[in-house]
Image: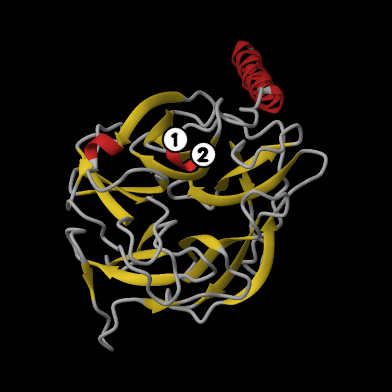
């Protein structure tokens, strides 16, 4: 009799604990958007170990964009700022307009690909590479010159993104002015390797592409995403395509991120996070508060990104509350 009573009491305690845990999960305050203060845009989100990292553009007039800050978090909610992880004093050829970092870890070192100088034909600038022993920097110039410093296939060398395929090959995707190129990176990131046809730059521009390319792989298929519209305007947005190869062809499916007149405008230039070993995804992007009209007044935000049964990306609902805390 005592045994049955003890078992009943244990079951009741377990049930109560479960109910309390569920209740706490439902009432847990969310991170809120923006996720950290300040004008920051073009956020690159990545996971290193048990930490989330965001590497954004400092959103200011071009001549003031002479450094990068980074932010780290254990849970998507509490963020720590790491100031000036790279600036123009560490890159002799970079003078201004330092944009859109793309950061990865390889062989124990951290590589940060970045754009600088808003380069036009005949000018010095383009896409550079910096390296550090810590994701918080300090980063230093890696090759002493731009990795891509010329205009190829009409693409301005900005908005770089590095994608690693399942075979280990790293690819550089980049491009402004409505054109997107793909190039093969050398294993040590000191240069580019031509494709089998002898070309170094392969254009993969989809319909309506403007800038901000990024790519990920899910269930054997390649998702190519980019920004559309003007970055200073309310209609800046994100669209995507899907293919069976990282080279396409990429047929535009449609927009999945755009303004909500009740929340914010100019939602675009994003990256995504996949929680390891799950199908749980987050989209990290910038947007402009409804109270702001200055093109540089952009904030970094995070919301959930989900897929339907056919593998299509569902339209993202941009929110003020953001996402719950999520430890790795």
In this rendering, the answer to whether 80 lies above or below 295 is above
Q: Residues within 10 Å of mark 2 (few under 14, many from 20)?
A: few
Q: Nearer the viewer, residue 276 or 151?
A: 151
- Tell me where residue 311 sits by quadrant: bottom right
User: Residue 295's quadrant in the figure?
Assistant: top right
Q: Residue 214 at what x, y percent from top left?
A: 48, 60
What residue is pinned by disc 1? 64
Dot label at residue 17 = none
Residue 55 visible somewhere in the drawing: no
Residue 264, given in percent of the width and then of the height, sits at 74, 40
Q: Residue at x 54, y 77 (%)?
A: 250
At 40% from the left and 62% from the top, the residue drawn is: 120
Tell me the residue that label 2 is attached to.
61
SS category of the residue bearing label 1: helix
Quarter the N terminus occupies: top right
Q: Residue at x 58, y 45 (%)?
A: 285
Point out the residue furthest to the right here. Answer: 262
In the current view of this chain or complex, which residue is farthest to the top? Answer: 2
Q: Nearer the viewer, residue 323 or 36?
A: 36
Relative side of 59 to 190, left or right: right
Q: How many marks?
A: 2
Does any portion of residue 204 appear in the rendered image? yes
Density class for disc 1 (Cα within 10 Å; few <14, some 14-19, many ≥20) is: few
- 208 and 307: which is toward the camera: 208
Query: Secondary structure beneath disc 2?
Result: loop
CB within 8 Å, label 2 to label 1: yes
Where 229 sits versus 20, above or below?
Answer: below
Residue drawn where x is 61% and y is 17% of the image: 10
Query: Which quadrant does the C terminus fall into?
Result: top left
Please tell me in which quadrant of the rendered image residue 172 appears. Answer: bottom left
For residue 189, side relative to residue 172 (left or right):
left
């Amino acid at each position: 009799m005592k045994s049955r009573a003890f078992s009943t009491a244990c079951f009741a305690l377990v049930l109560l604990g479960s109910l309390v845990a569920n209740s706490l999960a439902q009432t847990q305050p969310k991170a809120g958007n923006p996720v950290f203060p300040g004008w920051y845009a073009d956020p690159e989100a990545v996971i290193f170990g048990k930490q989330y990292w965001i590497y954004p553009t400092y959103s200011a007039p071009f001549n003031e964009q002479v450094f990068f800050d980074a932010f780290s978090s254990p849970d998507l909610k509490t963020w720590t700022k790491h100031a000036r992880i790279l600036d123009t004093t560490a890159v002799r050829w970079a003078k201004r307009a330092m944009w859109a970092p793309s950061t990865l870890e390889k062989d124990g070192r951290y590589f940060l690909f970045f754009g600088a100088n808003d380069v036009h034909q005949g000018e010095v600038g383009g896409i550079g590479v910096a390296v550090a022993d810590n994701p918080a920097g300090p980063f230093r110039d890696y090759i002493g010159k731009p990795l891509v410093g010329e205009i190829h296939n009409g693409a301005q060398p900005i908005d770089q993104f590095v994608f690693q395929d399942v075979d280990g090959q790293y690819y550089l995707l980049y491009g402004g002015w409505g054109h997107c190129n793909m190039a093969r990176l050398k294993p040590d990131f000191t240069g580019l390797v031509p494709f089998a046809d002898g070309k170094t730059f392969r254009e993969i521009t989809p319909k309506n592409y403007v800038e901000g390319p990024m790519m990920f792989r899910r269930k054997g298929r390649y998702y190519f995403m980019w920004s559309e519209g003007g970055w200073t305007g309310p209609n800046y947005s994100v669209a995507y395509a899907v293919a069976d190869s990282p080279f396409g062809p990429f047929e535009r499916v449609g927009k999945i991120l755009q303004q909500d007149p009740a929340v914010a405008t100019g939602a675009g230039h994003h990256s995504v996070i996949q929680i390891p070993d799950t199908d749980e995804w987050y989209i990290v992007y910038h947007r402009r508060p409804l109270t702001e009209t200055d093109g540089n007044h952009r904030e970094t935000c995070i919301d959930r990104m989900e897929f339907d049964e056919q593998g299509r990306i569902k339209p993202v609902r941009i929110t003020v509350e953001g996402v719950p805390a999520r430890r790795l």
